[in-house]
Image: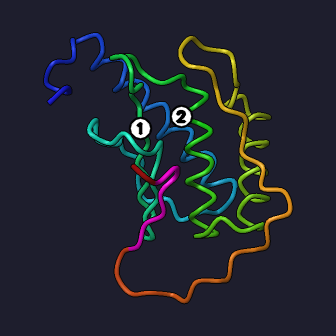
Amino acid sequence: PRSQRLTESERETRERAIERLRRHAAVLAEAFELPLRSVEPESERVRSRYGICYSDGRIQIRLHQLRSDGVLKYSVMVDTLCHELAHLRHFNHGRRFWAFYRRILAYASRQGIYRPGSEMGIAAPEPFRAPGLPAAPRAEPRRGLIQLELFPGG
């Protein structure tokens, strides 16, 4: 696997990024009273999403770029983190989810956690806006773990 071929410097960069994300996630989760359990790096094999949230409070964030060995821009990771944190309250992509996600992102920006365009790497995406979409129906509580993926597919 690619992770075994990472240089020491690449491993250290990724470790620093995940530790920074964990600290920022704790600040955001506390500010919004979210049941965050952990933030872990996503598997290097995952190519179809930036993050994933589980109903037990675990979040995984992709750290790596797909076309190079580099680490994603930190603002991209924070944007993804805010998206996944919003799922800890709204496990769907309805209107309330998007409004809550924007509140978390705005708070992260005011706290200096989210600073798009301030670091080298790939360009930060604009936060997704879902204008005019109807609210998703409330899911019935289910037993066991469920997950919601950001950018699911192929």
Amino acid type of the residue tagged 1 in the rendering: Arg
- Residue at x-position 76% and y-position 67%: 96
Residue at screen point 80% across, 34% down: 110
Identify the residue under disc 2. 77
**Judging from the image, what secondary structure is the residue with disc 2 in?**
helix
Q: Which mark is residue 19?
A: none
Per the model, the C-alpha gap separating discs 2 and 1 is 7 Å
**Highlighted magenta segment, given as a residue range:** 146-152
Q: Are marks 2 and 1 in contact (CB under 8 Å)?
A: yes
Image height of 131 relative to 2, above or below: below
Q: Residues within 10 Å of mark 1 (few under 14, many from 20)?
A: many
Residue displayed at 48% across by 30% down: 20
Question: Relative to residue 147, is residue 108 drawn left or right?
Answer: right
- How crowded pointer 2 is (Cα within 10 Å; few <14, some 14-19, many 20+) is rated as many
Residue 56 is covered by the magenta coloring: no
Q: Which residue is mark 1?
A: 62
